Amino acid sequence: MARLFEIPEQGAVGPRASRAGLIVCAVFAAACVTQEPARIAPSLPVITHNPEAVPWTSLEPLAGPDDFRFVVVSDRTGEHRAGIFESAMPKVNLLQPAFVMSVGDLIEGYTEDQAELDAQWDEIDGFVSQLEMPFFYLAGNHDMSNATMVETWRARYGPTYYQFIHKDVLFLALNSELFSMVSKPGHPVPGPDTQAAQMDWVRGVLADHPDVRWTIVFIHQPFWDQGREIHPDWLEIEVLLAERKHSVFAGHYHAYTKHVRHDSSYITLATTGGGSGLRGLLYGEFDHVAMVTMGEQGPRIANLLLDGIQDEDVRGEQTRAVVSLLETALVARALEAEPGPFVGGSAEFRVDNAGGAPLVVDGVFSASADIEPELGQISQTIAPGASAVLDIPLRAARPTPVTRIAPAHAFWTLRTQDRSGREIVHSQNSLLLPVTRFPCTRSPGAIEVDGSLEEWGTLRFAGLLPSVVEHSESWSGAQDLSYDFDVRCDGEFLYVGIDVLDDAIVASEDRIAREQDGIALALDGRKDPARSGTHKNYFAAVRDGTLASMLNLQGTTKTPKRDDVWATFMPPVPATVLQVVALRPGGYVAEFAIPYAWIDEKQEGPWEAVRLELSVLDFDPGEPQHATLWWLPSRFGSQALPLTGTFERP
């Protein structure tokens, strides 16, 4: 009998890994047995009127003797949503595939705490234990980001890359973190494995199996789609694969895209419980598993969603490219106003059509209690390569201070076509809101960062309504959570004081800051134009270093558990920054003090202005989701406005 599962030589591995080979050989032993083609043999009564008429179309079953099915599950982590991955396991059992493959990112990881790693892997193993068929683990960046995590993997699961053959199909499971770590691009994950050894192994495996009917590769990071020069080792692998029938599966981006390279499908899957906006098919954002049927003509892929079944062309790179253009086509310009009462002005939006088909922009405008758009709707067609500026006059329902204005809304629909003629529609909600540059006023007295705001006097930003509420269904109004705040300067420090009214405090030293009540404060001390710009993609801001260049503070009433993911991508808070959060009856108070020296260093001289982003998280006992209340819209999203939250030096 041919060996069906081969483990590369990588030194000593744990006992579980050695058992894995035996298990897979046993499960797939039937693949080595020659089978005759099946044929249905029904029994019929005597037919006298038309012996050629039968109640079927064929007697040949669809499945051939070498056909089989397997399921691929995708990213579970990166702001994972509880309950999704584990609920998918019994659904996979209903599908009865031969086995289940992973494309990595099963745990949140990014920690060297052994007890925490064991707990996270124990949780995953518990979910996977629901399966009635074999499950193949694959390492993603969340699973393998430091030496401790590598050793934990090897002790529990053995090799970090491996192969097996089932019914003459070669499966390769690769370790993308040996190519290049996500947290440290250009460097392999530390540990006993090396990228050179992995590449030698790949060359050897492919050379040893030149005549398999198909080769399927699994790797977490889609190196062919990283927006920069493709890793040379991956290019070599593509060359090695090019002369054979093959398919590739990856994850990592939490958005589905099919590429065609070397006349083969390169599939980046969406999520199976990982962080996602869940905006739907055009955006590639959905929870799914991929059911792959391996037949004579190669793999057929059915993407099984919670609400339907889609084939592998659910979103291709052409569609993604057009959607990406639409997502960035419409950009708000700042409607600047003086700090006093707002009377009126015009909101402007620039639209660029970088596509190859006409772009139709439709806007519908909705008033708030404070702002009334003078237009009810607008429509304009923009030729390929052209631009336009859409002007929406606004008037104040009554003179209202800029600090307290409730924004009006613009609901946009952008329509165009991809090269195949398929209509692509993108919807976007923008805020109609004046912005202003606030003075960082001097404090009437010395400020002590002690969790009390008594010496602050009247807070300028009091009684305001949040401009944006994420998961508004979890926020019942000001009695649920509200906050007042102010920003002060004294010549040495910039201070931020926040008074939060919260009807139920959810706080624990066993939770990270992002999973309990608290304040998220980001201060951008860079020069313009970088400081005043916007990003429509949070992850792009992580990748290009924008977030890491900012001072990101998290204030909770209890010392939170270390957030290893946050610590990996965000720089540590300087020791010179002061922060205190103190409980009070019905809520809590937070004070932050940022030294001028830190801001001066960012601006390479005496600072002139900073930009502040403030949000408050509201968790309530028993509610499955939490609300996030933004003072002004985040600059890292579709509702971003330039200049918001700018404070000038006194």
Image: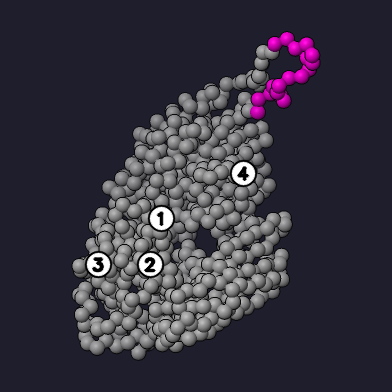
Q: CA distance from mark 1 to mark 4?
A: 27 Å
- Closer to the chain start, of discs 2 and 3, is 3
Which quadrant of the figure has residue 596? bottom left
- Up-down relation of residue 552 to residue 599 (above or below): above
Residue on which disc 2 sits: 629
Which quadrant of the figure has residue 583? bottom left
Residue on which disc 4 sits: 311
Horizontal and vertical percent position of residue 102? 48, 42
**Nearer to the camera, 98 or 234:** 98
Chain part drawn in magenta = 45-62
Give the crowd class for mark 4: few <14, some 14-19, many >=20 residues within 10 Å. few
Q: Main secondary structure of the magenta part?
A: loop
Give the crowd class for mark 2: few <14, some 14-19, many >=20 residues within 10 Å. many
Q: Determine the residue positioned at 58% across, 48% down.
A: 267
- Closer to the chain start, of discs 3 and 1, is 1
Q: Nearer the viewer, mark 1 or mark 2?
A: 2
**Kind of residue sitting beneath label 1:** Glu
**Kind of residue sitting beneath label 4:** Asp
**Kind of residue sitting beneath label 2:** Leu
Q: Does 636 appear in magenta?
A: no
- Up-down relation of residue 496 to residue 540 (above or below): below
Quadrant assignment for the C terminus: bottom left
Q: CA distance from mark 3 to mark 4?
A: 50 Å
Q: CA distance from mark 3 to mark 1?
A: 26 Å
- Closer to the chain start, of discs 3 and 4, is 4
Residue 79's tag is 1
- Closer to the chain start, of discs 4 and 2, is 4
Residue on which disc 3 sits: 587
Q: Are marks 2 and 3 in contact (CB under 8 Å)?
A: no
**Nearer to the camera, 23 or 243:** 23
